[in-house]
Amino acid sequence: MSNSKVVTCSFTMDRDTYDAFKSIVVKNHQNVKGNLIRYMQYVIDYETPNAETIDAIEEVKRMKADPSLGKTYDNVDEMMRDLLDV
C-alpha cells in the first residue's frame, strides 16, 4: 500500500557541492534531509527562497516577542522620527 500524502524525492548533484553543503549543516548539528525539508517549509511559509529575508523576518518576530532585544516600529515615519530625534 502506498500513502498518497507522501512523496519520495530523488535527484543527482555534483559530489563536491553535496559534500560542501553537508559539512555546513553537520557543523550546525543538522542533517541534509532535515535541512532541505526545513528550507522547503520556509519557502512555503514566506513565499521567498531568500535566506537573508527569512532571517530578517525571524529577527523581527523575536524582537516583537521580547522587547528587551530592541525597539520595533510600526511604520517608517515612526522609525525616522526616532532616528532623527525630530
Image (spheres, helix red, strand yellow):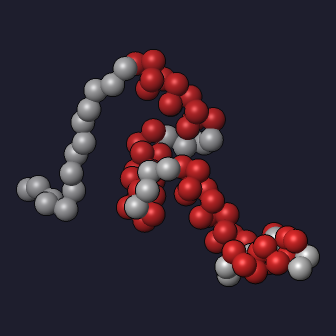
Name the image quarter holding the C terminus: bottom right
Q: Quick check: 17 above or below 50?
A: above
How far across and down, in percent of the image, does residue 26 sit? 57, 35
Q: Nearer the viewer, residue 13 or 59?
A: 59
Residue at position x 61%, y 56% from top? Answer: 55
Compared across the picture, whether 7 is left or right of 43 comes to: left
Q: How many marks?
A: 0
* Corner quadrant of residue 60: bottom right
Q: Nearer the viewer, residue 40 or 19?
A: 40
How far across and down, in percent of the image, does residue 77 sit? 72, 78
Asked whether residue 64 appears in the rendered view, the answer is no
* Corner quadrant of residue 36: top left
* Corner quadrant of residue 1: bottom left
Q: Quick check: 45 above or below 32?
A: below
Residue at position x 47%, y 46% from top? Answer: 35
Q: Residue furthest left?
A: 1
How far across and down, in percent of the image, does residue 38 sit? 45, 53
Residue at position x 37%, y 20% from top? Answer: 14
Compared across the picture, whether 69 is left or right of 11 comes to: right
How far across and down, in percent of the image, does residue 69 sit? 81, 69
Compared across the picture, whether 58 is left or right of 19 comes to: right
